[in-house]
Image (cartoon, coloured by chain):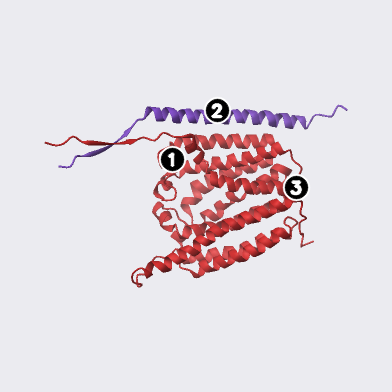
Amino acid sequence: MMPETIERPRYDAEAFRKARAGRNIALGLGLMAFVIIVFVVSVIRMGANVQPHF
Amino acid sequence: MTQPAAIKIRAAVPALWSDYLQLLKPRVMSLVVFTALTGLVCADTAMNPVLAGVAILCIAVGAGASGALNMWYDADIDARMRRTRGRPVPAGKVAGAEALALGVTLSLFSVMLMGMTTNWLAAGLLAFTILFYAVVYTMWLKRSTAQNIVIGGLAGALPPAIGWAAASGDAPLNAWLLVLIIFVWTPPHFWALSLYTAEDYARAGVPMMPVVKGAASTRRQIFLYSLALIPVCLAPAFTGLGGPVYLAIAATGGMVFLLLAWRVLRSKAGDAPDERIEGEDRLYAVRAGAKDARNLFAVSILYLALLFAALLGEHLLGVAPLELLS
């Protein structure tokens, strides 16, 4: 009799840890980029409204 | 005695950051960025380059957000189509709720940042585009009418107007002419694709034109929209938007486009194999027709890219527009 085959997903903890670390780094870089963009845009927009002093 | 079960181990795949990036449909995003940039440059308004870059980024992220919302809602359809079943949600890499959360978050961020960086007309147009694509097209039109991509095409057509509004705070007639070009270009482009993927759409229950009205009707409508597209593409040379290079590309490319649409009209693209023909010859006529549809699909992308590249190049280099009407 042929052995029965059961497909059972294996939880590869190391692969999941690596993937989560990659996602966290991507999210962190995205948030950092957003903060920098908001800062730079604010400076440029406010700078456009400053009257020249000379 | 029964042998112990052999366990075939299949590793579960964790979601990578690149899977989330795939939710944003990067290929579609690149076309949106290109057309939006053309609109922004064609406005011929002096703009801080950093603000211009952020405006284009907002449009790209907004387009990506609507892509994520589309993949969340259409996961059931995507799973049944060969072309889309490898997408992160149907493939089980990313949960639907996460795609939804990503789409909503990026929509809010992109619209707010666009308003803060440029003006609220551009932000409003961006918000309208995202809502139109995610709600009107994805949730309503796509599953209910064969005109889905005709009306829904407006979402893909709006980026040049957003770019123009971002630069000038205004959306004049020439900005809407760019929108009209993409809007009229969309049906022949998508229907050419759907002629050789109709089986997939039928299996998924999507009422694309060849599935609902048949291949012959679709081929006729492709030709009619192609006829309408040529004068629309020539119009910028008469309204002070396009120069001589643009006119040459619009005219020669338009003739090629029309010729290919004519070949599709005369072909058997999308037809079921004729049962009366014996052997391999039966499929040959249909396959040859599919080739005509593939050619039109490929050339349609090239034509649109060249038209917008010509406008972009002319405005960057300061080539004077023709203004043939004045």
Q: Residue at x 48, y 30 (%)?
A: A22
Percent across and percent down for residue B27 are 54, 46
Task: Count neighbours of disc 1 (C-alpha within 10 A) and say few if under 14, some if 14 to 19, many if 20 or more.
Answer: many
Mark 1 vs mark 3: same chain? Answer: yes
Q: Calculate the distance from the C-alpha at mark 1 to the C-alpha at mark 2.
A: 23 Å
Task: Judge from the rendering whether residue B211 lies leftward or rightward of residue B173; answer left or right.
Answer: left
Query: Is residue B198 left or right of B178 when viewed as pictured?
Result: left
Q: Residue at x 41, y 46 (%)?
A: B85
Give amino acid for label 1.
Val
The residue carrying mark 3 is: B44
Q: CA distance from mark 3 to mark 2?
A: 36 Å
Mark 1–mark 3 CB contact (< 8 Å): no
Label 2 sits on what residue type? Answer: Gly
Residue A28 is marked as: 2
Q: Quadrant of the C terminus of chain B?
A: bottom right
The residues bearing labels 1 and 3 have C-alpha atoms spaced at a distance of 42 Å
Judging depth in this view, the residue of B41 and B153 nearest the camera is B41
| Chain for disc number 3 | B
Mark 1 or 3 closer to N-term?
3
Indicate the amino acid at tag 3. Answer: Asp
The tint chain B carries is red
Determine the residue positioned at 45% across, 43% down: B87
* Figure check: B95 above or below B170: above
Query: Residue B1 shows which numbered tag?
Result: none
The residue wearing badge 1 is B89
